[in-house]
């Protein structure tokens, strides 16, 4: 009998996903796996079934019996059920109504010029940080501070707090935390509660103020939900984009011909490059968690009510049934129906923001520093394999 595979699967490096995904896609679109903590789950590996699961209202982040739910990791985010089973859809609809205007594509276009100013400021810091050997850490001076600056301004969070909430983010996303992740999340919620209190006393033009006003208008919108939403926005608003900037730069720098082609036609290749970075960058390795709220049939298997489902967008984005030569980085790929932001009613609300940041970073970085290259070999990178969001801790470059 073949043992049930356990996540995360071994991968050759930070840019390539585990070869086992290709094997599983050939065998079956939905397979049983064990989570890192040993609980059973279903893993969705193909594109069509991933879209089907994303769009199925019978799956959600809540669990009909939370105390019996399979757990994924010891982290305090995407580790198990969240929200109330009876009111999940209502809470989701309220959240979308509140946040769509703040994260709309139109608002992101208006934000574009300001993001460009922030990128230029970060690039100034990167250039100034070069050491005697001409090396600087792109992660420390661009990939990390830029998304933090942007999300702080959108939410109304003091940029001076960045090291504090970044430290909390790392603790809550530790795959093996020994209980510290839960303590860090409680501290995170207390922090966002203080931010909300400050907005009640002095409102601003920001998302936290919008949430506070919504709470005042709707007594059912409790403090616990407000602090949970704010912490989630602050965490996801910088962690995921930091990783994609780092890996996007790596995807270009590990292939000089690819970098040179981009530099030679930044405007023409920018959109396609960003979409390929979104498709291929896979900083994590566990998938997106859902629970079945009813018995459902997907990919030839019966998933019972309450069972956990992990959707591997990394695998779905390399499905040969959807993408020609899926392992090839192709900025001319049309169409490019990747699932990096999900699909359907739960499509990531921050998609336009992420695209704005990535487009601005790649355009200005490689226009200003066309000879950018890695200062160390890729296998020397310090990979955050202990973190749910993955990525690298530093990205030494030179030019």
Image (cartoon, grey):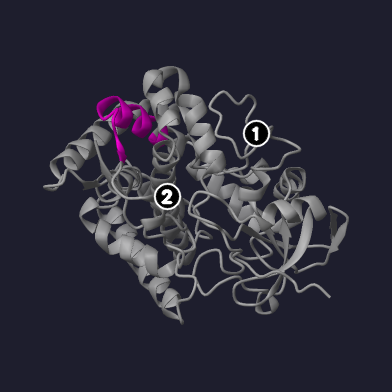
Q: Seen in the image, is 313 located left or right of residue 163?
A: right
Name the outermost residue toward the left: 132
- How far apart are labels 2 and 1 at the CA level? 21 Å
Quadrant hosting residue 96 = top right
- Residue 398, given in percent of the width and then of the height, sits at 24, 41
Residue 337 is tagged as 1
10 Å crowding of disc 2: few (<14), some (14-19), many (20+): many
Which residue is at a point 63% across and 66% down the rendered structure image?
84
- Residue 146, given in percent of the width and then of the height, sits at 30, 43
Name the outermost residue toward the bottom: 178
- Residue 336, given in percent of the width and then of the height, sits at 62, 31
Overall secondary structure of the magenta stretch?
Answer: helix
State the residue in front, 386 or 56: 386
- Residue 388, given in percent of the width and then of the height, sits at 49, 63
Task: Give whichever of discs 2 and 1 has the lower sequence position.
Answer: 2
State the residue in front, 248 or 78: 248
Secondary structure beneath dot 2 equals: helix
**Which residue matches tag 2?**
243
Q: Quadrant of the N terminus?
A: bottom right
Relative vertical location of residue 349 with respect to residue 27 in this rendering, above or below: above
Q: Is residue 107 visible?
A: no
Q: Is residue 284 visible?
A: yes
Q: Seen in the image, is 121 located left or right of residue 181?
A: left
The magenta stretch spans which residues?
357-373
Is-magenta flag for residue 364? yes
Is-magenta flag for residue 24? no
Q: Seen in the image, is 289 located left or right of residue 120?
A: right
């Amino acid at each position: 009998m073949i043992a049930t595979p356990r996540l995360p699967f071994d991968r050759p490096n930070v840019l390539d996903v585990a070869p086992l995904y290709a094997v599983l896609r050939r065998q079956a679109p939905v397979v049983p796996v064990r989570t890192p903590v040993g609980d059973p789950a279903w893993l969705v590996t193909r594109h069509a079934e991933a879209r089907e699961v994303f769009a199925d209202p019978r799956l959600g982040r809540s669990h009909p019996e939370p105390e019996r739910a399979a757990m994924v990791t010891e982290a305090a985010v995407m580790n198990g059920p969240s929200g109330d089973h009876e009111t999940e859809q209502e809470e989701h609809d309220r959240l979308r109504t509140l946040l769509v205007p703040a994260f709309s594509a139109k608002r992101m276009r208006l934000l574009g010029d300001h993001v460009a100013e922030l990128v230029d400021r970060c690039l100034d810091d990167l250039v100034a940080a070069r050491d005697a050997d001409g090396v600087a850490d792109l992660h420390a001076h661009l990939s990390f501070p830029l998304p933090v600056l942007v999300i702080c301004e959108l939410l109304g969070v003091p940029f001076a707090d960045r090291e504090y909430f970044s430290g909390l983010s790392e603790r809550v996303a530790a795959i093996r935390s020994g209980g510290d992740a839960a303590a860090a999340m409680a501290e995170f919620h207390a922090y966002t509660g203080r931010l909300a209190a400050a907005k009640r006393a002095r409102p601003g033009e920001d998302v936290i103020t919008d949430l506070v006003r919504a709470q005042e208008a709707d007594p059912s919108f409790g403090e616990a939900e407000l602090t949970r939403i704010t912490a989630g926005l602050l965490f996801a608003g910088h962690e995921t984009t930091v990783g994609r900037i780092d890996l996007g730069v790596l995807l270009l720098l590990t292939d000089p011909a690819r970098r040179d082609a981009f530099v030679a036609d930044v405007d023409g290749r920018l959109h396609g490059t960003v979409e390929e970075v979104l498709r291929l960058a896979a900083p994590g390795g566990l998938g997106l968690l859902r629970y079945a709220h009813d018995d459902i049939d997907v990919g030839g298997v019966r998933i019972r009510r309450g069972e956990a489902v992990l959707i591997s967008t990394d695998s779905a984005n390399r499905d040969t049934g959807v993408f020609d030569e899926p392992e090839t980085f192709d900025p001319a790929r049309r169409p490019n129906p990747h699932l990096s932001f999900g699909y359907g009613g739960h499509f990531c609300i921050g998609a336009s923001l992420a695209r704005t940041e990535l487009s601005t970073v790649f355009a200005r970085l490689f226009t200003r520093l066309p000879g950018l290259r890695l200062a160390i070999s890729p296998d020397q990178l310090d990979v955050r394999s202990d973190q749910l969001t993955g990525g690298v801790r530093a990205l030494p470059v030179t030019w």
